Image (spheres, helix red, strand yellow):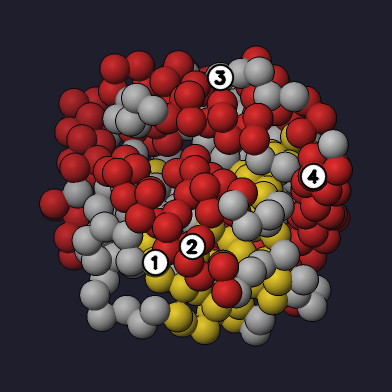
Amino acid sequence: MRVAMVSEHASPLAGLGTPDAGGQNVHVAALAAAIAALGHEVTVYTRRDDPHTPERVPFAPGVTVAHVPAGPPEPIPKDDIVGYVPDFARWLREQWTFDRPDVAHSHFWMSGLATLDAARRLGVPVAHTFHALGTVKRRHQGIEDTSPATRIPAERTIGRTADVIVSTCPDEVEELVRMGVPRQQARVVPCGVDLDLFRPGASGAPQRPRLLSIGRLVPRKGVQTVVQALPYLPEVELVVGGGLPIGDLDRDEEVNRLRAEADRLGVSAQVRFVGQVARQDVPGLMRSATAVVCVPWYEPFGMVVLEAMACGVPVIASAVGGQQDTVVHEETGLLVPAHSPREVARATRRLLADPAARDAYGTAGAHRASSRYSWDRVAAETVSAYGQAMLHLRRIAAS
């Protein structure tokens, strides 16, 4: 089967931790490679953001990344890409007219618009993964939500038009149903984890208790909540990974905001910012922590907690979105309310006071990650969803 994956702003080749590079990049990269490993041919289409990048770049066995000339060949915020969606769709349609995929899988709403525009005219079945929904973002960010006004109606249209919606968690399915998307169009397939990279090992934990927060540094990720928990945890160190490279952190707006908050609370000596962390260095950093803390306001899935679990590290996570399914409370870690520094502190104290429970959470987390979230399993379930998309399109054509 020839699979076209469309990920307009999140390239598999992008560095992680910057404002528009995070879990979706990892998801698309790993899923494409895992599907190709099952014997399929995958091309990932992403927007060209560098004039010197070749049009096509081999990425993994059976996977090619194609750079689409839509908009200026330079980095632009993802919320500004929507104006170039018609150009993106036109280029896809021209390519697929002579090189037709068997199925197209779009990632994020703007990719969905471009993919449906191109695919519908050519009779290509479409699977779509939202990664995040505008209704949820608007609910939690309010006037600070920078998404284009067209996002929510566009997502509603995509949900009703795509042949199958591949949702990463049941919470998203319920949100889609409230938006008027037929429940039978949605299929839950979680994100996966690289079990060769993220695995239990020697902890190398420091003598001082350490919390680790790692990922994209944007306000909704809730790192400020962890900083605000530190006055209740004077013996604890917080390591924050993500943002710009360490030499450029003084220019990172979110790092400066968090530093100001730490100064205000008198906990600056407890917080260490390490900047962008190379992918291969993340597992070691996770294993050095007493616990990995991931307390976003909302989270479509939560890859960080899954990676920490795979490393055998207990997690403290906000009970939102997909994290409610990934983390089993009091078995693989502790779930806490979002926006609650006191609950983060209370959960941390529970782990510090009970090393046996801490070890048990780590062991159970590693088992859950390996038994449920391998990319082999996720890829097989995704390919099955493609079959559902093909069947749905055939039924439409026959009706």
Disc 2 element? helix
Disc 3 element? loop
Closer to the chain start, of discs 4 and 3, is 3
Instruction: Give the percent coordinates (x, y) of residue 159.
Output: 63, 32
- At horizontal 45% and vertical 16% (from top left) the residue drawn is 139
Query: Label 1 neighbourhood size at 10 Å, few (<14), some (14-19), many (20+)?
Result: many
Closer to the chain start, of discs 2 and 3, is 2
The quadrant where residue 41 appears:
bottom right
Disc 1 element? strand
Instruction: Give the percent coordinates (x, y) of residue 141.
Output: 37, 21
Q: Nearer the viewer, mark 1 or mark 4?
A: 4
Q: Cα distance, mark 1 to mark 3?
A: 41 Å
Closer to the chain start, of discs 1 and 4, is 1
Give the quarter of the figure containing the N terminus. bottom right
Q: What amino acid does circle 1 point to?
A: Val
Q: Nearer the viewer, mark 4 or mark 2?
A: 4
The correct choice, above or below, for 206 with respect to 138 in the image is: below
The correct choice, above or below, for 183 with respect to 252 in the image is: above
Closer to the chain start, of discs 4 and 2, is 2
Q: What amino acid does circle 2 point to?
A: Leu
Residue holding disc 2 = 92
Could you tell whether 255 is left or right of 193 in the image?
left
Q: Cα distance, mark 1 to mark 2?
A: 8 Å
Q: What amino acid does circle 4 point to?
A: Ala
Residue holding disc 1 = 68
The correct choice, above or below, for 203 with respect to 343 in the image is: below
Query: Label 4 neighbourhood size at 10 Å, few (<14), some (14-19), many (20+)?
Result: few
Instruction: Give the percent coordinates (x, y) of residue 90.
Output: 42, 58
- At horizontal 61% and vertical 40% (from top left) the residue drawn is 301
Residue holding disc 4 = 397
